[in-house]
Amino acid sequence: MIRGGYICLSFHFRKREQLRVKLKNSRIEKHHIEDFVGRTYMSFCVLLLITIIVSMVYFVASKGISTFTSGDVSVTDFLFGTKWSPEADTPSFGAFPFITGSFLVTLLAALIASPLSLCAALFMTEIVPGWGKKLLQPVIELLAGIPSVVYGFIGLSVIVPFLRNNLPGQGIGVAAGALVLSVMILPTITSVAADALASLPQNLKESSYALGATRWQTISRVIIPTTFPAIMTGIVLGMARAFGEALAVQMVIGNAPFVPKSLFESASTLTSVITLGMGNTTMGSAHNNALWSMALVLMLMTFVFVFFVRLLERRNKI
Amino acid sequence: MQFKKSWVMTLALTSVLALSACGNGGANNTGGNAAATNEGSGAKISGSILASGSTALQPLVELVAENFMDKNAGVDIQVQGGGSGTGLTQVAEKQVDIGNSDVFAEEKLKDADAEKAAALVDHQVAVVAIAAVTHPDAGVDSLTKQQLIDIFTGKITNFKEVGGADQKIQIINRPGSSGTRATFESFALGTKTEDIPGSIQEDSSGTVKKMIGETPGAIGYLALSYLDDSIKTLSLDGVEASVDNVISGKYPVWAYEHMYTNGEPNETVKAFLDFFLTDEVQTGEVVELGYIPAVKMQVTRDVAGNVTAK
């Protein structure tokens, strides 16, 4: 019996060895190859992406910093100087008017767009969840898809004459820029707010109604405070988009390189002055370098916005 | 199933790499192709030319390029925009064959880049004249040089001070680095002006025309090819802004359109530039698009601005 068992066992082991060898030569090899190809391809794509982003940041930074290292423009002169005349006999590169212009127009646009977006998002999710979403969703997506130059042209043809006929000033100015930008960031804020509102747990609303609250009380005292961080995320994303918008703003804001004293005065943003000046200046000239420094400021502001968004997202999760 | 997926991925990857290689290869081969046709090409011209730069000159170069390509099937000409500054930078770096510019190269490439300008060869293919324009209701027909200077420096703020309607003046200027502005300031005003608060700056001539036509009290300047009935053209010191006055030299606000090459042009580029100066193009496309033929000018002007009779 022991001998029989020994023969059985050895036979079993030999069979297993044969089976293992067979498997190794066929299916397992192929599976490893596919794994390897997939991993390499993905690593290559990720490396390419990282290289592109890093080299872009490096290029903008190196060109932007050269204003301060090669010329005689100091950082405080650039950031807080109010005189911008790069083509004069003694050029001065004060970018303060553009920084204030950018911030002013972005904040105004966010102020105008946020209540509208919030109301649209509430309409879609709370008031008429049935056909409200069906109606507003395509509208929002359409607004998001319109190219920015179309917005600029509509602003120039419709908003500017309207402002000129009804309000002081020539129509061109900060107000026109803020209005055009607010329409552009409306879809961004609305979609983020609608997503946040839709992801609220149902029992929150139900318990509020159960306690006898009206719909408006529920919305204003329960829903909005709860989703406030998420809505703020949407607003900050909208502001980031408004800050970086170039063409639409350049067509309606007037581009005078001065700090605006009223909402209806011609002003400039960082993006509009870069659009106007890049093509006409030669690479390496002081004017061109100053424009690159403004591009660097824009990029740094984008990092700040992204940082804020991530901060808010972390608070959302709590 | 997995077999197909990896095929699709490899195909996508190789096509992306091939496309990027093609894009680069086109520009890199420009010099190579044109040089290769230098040997033994008697009647047939072939090669590829890349031009970039001024958007004001771009429509003319594109039209003439089409004409040239129809006549010489072996030539491929690509025209890009980007602005005079970009065109000059790129031709100085030999990234393009021809740099289109609205201003002399020495005016943009100066100080540290002056030797780059010295290496470029100028070909003046057309003349563009600029006229001061106002909103149709402004009520002025002609302004003196001093009045224009006062308007653009902000000393005169209402059109009634110069004999027009009671409209607050709204300046519609170009950006500080614009070649059109440099020409207008050098030859109409005689001095550089600073931007004043409340003025509007736009780069595109089309947008400027639209704004001047719609804004009461607006004043700006446009090339002759953009003038029409939606705006009022002003005479400068009593001299009307017409083609004949520019040719004779009576109207001083004009500038050459330059096509710069880095050093002497190779055979294909030289053929194209010579074609530009033939009568057919100078009386055809050049006039058709609203420019003035360079060959018809009775005066010439150099970099320093000195005008001499031809």
Image (spheres, coloured by chain):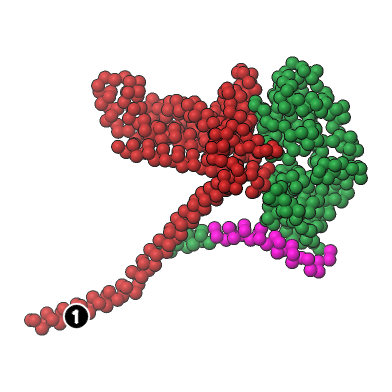
Chain colours: A red, B green
Q: Position of residue B62 (x, y in %)?
A: 75, 48
Q: Residue furthest bottom?
A: A3
The answer to if B37 sits in the magenta stretch is yes
Characterize the magenta stretch by its predominant secondary structure.
Answer: helix
* Residue A225 in which image quadrant: top left
* Residue A216 in which image quadrant: top left
Near-viewer residue (A216 or A101)? A101
Question: Where B274 sits versus B288, above or below?
Answer: below
Question: Where B134 sits versus A199, above or below?
Answer: above
The residue labelled by disc 1 is A11
* Chain that bears disc 1: A
Near-viewer residue (B179 or A190)? B179
Amino acid bearing label 1 = Phe
Tell me where the magenta segment starts and ends, as one range: B16-43
Asked whether, in this view, residue B301 is left or right of residue B58, the answer is: right
* Quarter containing the N terminus of chain A: bottom left
